[in-house]
């Protein structure tokens, strides 16, 4: 499990660096996104990964790793947007964004550790293709919850789906990294 802890932190660190650098470049322009738009951004990235996996080739430079990093970061954006009211400031200071990012990742990692305890790291035996399918399913769930005006009868809410998406992206990044280093 300690290896998973280190691998998780390493995968997240790369995503976090990108997120904070883009925040310095663009500010928090993503604050204008509604939750459906965040879901669509993740959907586009997951569909692209799936298409590349199925075709076995790509024509645009961004690789699968960068798309999983984008999925993770959009998951963080979704969680932040759920917490911040629409009428609050659109532009957030970088230090505040960093704090919010770290809070969401801390919660995601705790969830991962709890689930790993119960599931015995079953994700290590899954295919990278399955992670993309799971992300797509979670996005469809988010869209349905939005269509239901945020109400669920028995299911988890939008935030739980974003947390799962983040962890699926981390798992995929870990497995890709392991594959690279085992070759």
Image (spheres, grey):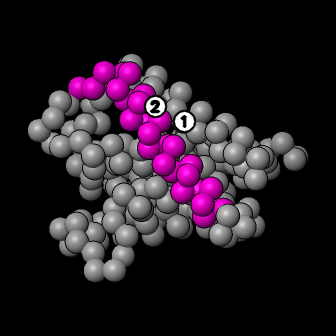
Helix, strand or loop at label 2? It is helix
Left or right of 142 in this view: 20:
right
41, 93: nearer the viewer: 93
Helix, strand or loop at label 1? It is helix
129, 27: nearer the viewer: 27
> Residue 22, relative to residue 33: is it above or below?
above
* Badge 2 density bin: few <14, some 14–19, many ≥20, Cα 10 Å: many
In the rendered structure, find residue 19 and report the number of the disc placed on it.
2
Is residue 56 visible in the rendered structure shown here?
Answer: yes
> x, y (%) of residue 171?
64, 54
Left or right of 178 in this view: 13:
left
Left or right of 87 in this view: 31:
right
> x, y (%) of residue 149?
18, 68
The residue shown at (30%, 66%) is 143
Which corner quadrant of the image does residue 103 belong to? top left
Is residue 55 visible in the rendered structure shown here?
Answer: no
139, 5: nearer the viewer: 5
- Seen from this angle, which residue lies furthest bottom? 153
In the rendered structure, find residue 15 and report the number of the disc placed on it.
1
How far, Cα to Cα, is label 2 from label 1?
A: 6 Å
Please state the extent of the stretch shown in magenta in the rendering.
91-116
The residue shown at (20%, 31%) is 90
In reply to whether residue 113 is colored magenta, the answer given is yes
The residue shown at (67%, 70%) is 119
> Residue 120, relative to residue 27: is it above or below?
below
Left or right of 182 in this view: 100:
left
Contact check, label 2 and label 1, Cβ < 8 Å: yes
In reply to whether residue 95 is colored magenta, the answer given is yes
């Amino acid at each position: 499990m300690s290896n998973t802890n280190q691998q998780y932190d390493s995968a997240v660190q790369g995503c976090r660096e990108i997120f904070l650098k883009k925040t310095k470049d663009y500010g928090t322009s993503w604050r204008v996104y509604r939750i459906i738009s965040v879901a669509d951004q993740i959907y586009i990235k997951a569909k692209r990964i799936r298409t590349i996996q199925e075709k076995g080739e790509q024509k645009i430079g961004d690789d699968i790793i960068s798309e999983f990093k984008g999925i993770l970061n959009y998951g963080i954006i979704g969680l932040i947007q759920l917490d911040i009211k629409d009428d609050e400031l659109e532009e957030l200071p970088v230090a505040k964004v960093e704090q919010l990012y770290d809070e969401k990742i801390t919660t995601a990692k705790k969830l991962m550790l709890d689930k790993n305890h119960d599931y015995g790291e079953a994700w290590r035996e899954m295919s990278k293709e399955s992670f993309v399918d799971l992300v797509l399913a979670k996005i469809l769930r988010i869209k349905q919850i939005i269509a239901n005006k945020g109400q669920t009868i028995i299911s988890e809410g939008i935030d739980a789906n974003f947390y799962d998406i983040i962890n699926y992206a981390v798992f995929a990044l870990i497995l890709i990294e392991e594959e690279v280093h085992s070759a």
